[in-house]
């Protein structure tokens, strides 16, 4: 849900529930279809395991400016999108959108005073950059990188990339990978995924996806948790 007021031709004030300005809309988390995969890194903001480039939607109020291919925005957001504990985040973004290339720089600082009962949810920040380029009429490449800090994981950095190929008018494939490094914990997370999708009509998509994930041992506090595993999915998506 989103409402807006066009104050001038370039300046818009809006509010509601939409993608966080802290999101990086590129790389694996921001660009892949990932209907049944990429479940590990694409988690919500502040979680115990990781902070992803694209944690999802948040309640917010936003002031946006756009002129030609350039845009920028600043938002005041709900910092804990999983429990709605009432803490706040401040996020900002500057983006360029062109025919052959697009990119963005984003940053977010979030607060959490732990009144939701989860001690590992705390203050943190992240800055990120991402971009995509069309390599001819068939292939496109999307990359993202970020660094940040939160009270549970300490300092971290991550990179991800996704290649997408339009094989026919109705079939396209994707392949991507992401790597996260938590320097204070001396741990890392690696994911590689691929998918192929068939869209007979615009309202329907069938897909076959697979993902390989490597996690540090004991990531759930249980040393018996399998640290290397595969995920396979057949998906059908209906749009009305």
Image: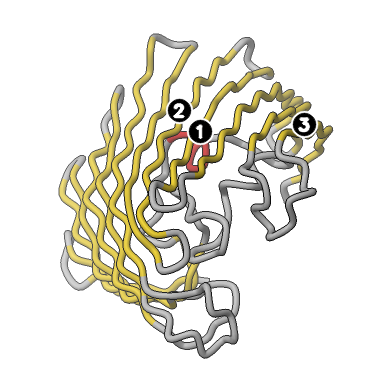
Q: Which residue is mark 2?
A: 161
Q: Which residue is mark 3?
A: 230
Q: Is residue 192 left or right of residue 141?
A: right
Relative to residue 25, is residue 99 depicted above or below?
A: above
Query: Residue 178 shows which numbered tag?
Result: 1
At which x and y percent is residue 122? Answer: 43, 75
**How would you rate the neighbour count of disc 1 (Cα within 10 Å): few for under 14, some for 14-19, many for 20 or more?**
many
Query: Residue 218 shows which numbered tag?
Result: none
- Tell me whether the residue at label 1 lies in contact with that at label 2, contact meaning CB atoms closer than 8 angstroms: yes
Please name the colour scheme applied to the rendered image.
secondary structure
Mark with earlier residue (2, 3): 2
Relative to residue 140, is residue 19 depicted above or below?
A: below
**How would you rate the neighbour count of disc 2 (Cα within 10 Å): few for under 14, some for 14-19, many for 20 or more?**
many
Q: Is residue 67 left or right of residue 56?
A: left
Q: Is residue 102 left or right of residue 58?
A: left
| Residue at the spot 48% in from the left edge and 42% down from the top edge | 30
Relative to residue 206, is residue 66 depicted above or below?
A: below
Per the model, the C-alpha gap separating discs 1 and 2 is 7 Å
Mark with earlier residue (1, 3): 1
Per the model, the C-alpha gap separating discs 1 and 3 is 15 Å
At which x and y percent is residue 180? Answer: 47, 41
């Amino acid at each position: 849900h989103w409402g807006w007021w066009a104050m001038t031709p370039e300046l818009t004030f809006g509010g509601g529930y939409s993608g966080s300005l802290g999101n990086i809309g590129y790389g694996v988390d921001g660009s892949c279809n990932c209907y049944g995969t990429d479940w590990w890194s694409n988690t919500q903001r502040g979680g115990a395991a990781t902070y992803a480039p694209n944690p999802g939607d948040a309640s917010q109020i936003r002031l946006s400016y756009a002129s030609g291919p350039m845009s920028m925005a600043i938002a005041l957001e709900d910092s804990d999108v999983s429990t709605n504990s009432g803490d706040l985040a401040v996020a900002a973004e500057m983006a360029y959108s062109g025919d052959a290339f697009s990119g963005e720089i984003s940053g977010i600082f979030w607060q959490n005073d732990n009144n939701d009962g989860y001690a590992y949810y705390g203050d943190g920040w992240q800055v990120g950059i991402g971009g995509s380029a069309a390599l001819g009429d068939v292939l496109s490449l999307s990359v993202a990188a970020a660094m940040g800090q939160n009270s549970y994981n300490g300092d971290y950095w991550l990179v991800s990339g996704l290649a997408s190929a339009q094989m026919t008018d109705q079939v396209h494939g994707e392949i991507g990978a992401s790597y996260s490094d938590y320097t204070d914990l001396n741990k890392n997370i690696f994911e590689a995924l691929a998918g192929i999708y068939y869209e007979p009509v615009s309202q329907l998509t069938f897909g076959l996806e697979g993902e390989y994930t490597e996690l540090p041992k004991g990531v759930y506090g249980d040393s018996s948790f399998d640290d290397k595993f595969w995920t396979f999915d057949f998906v059908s998506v209906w749009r009305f």
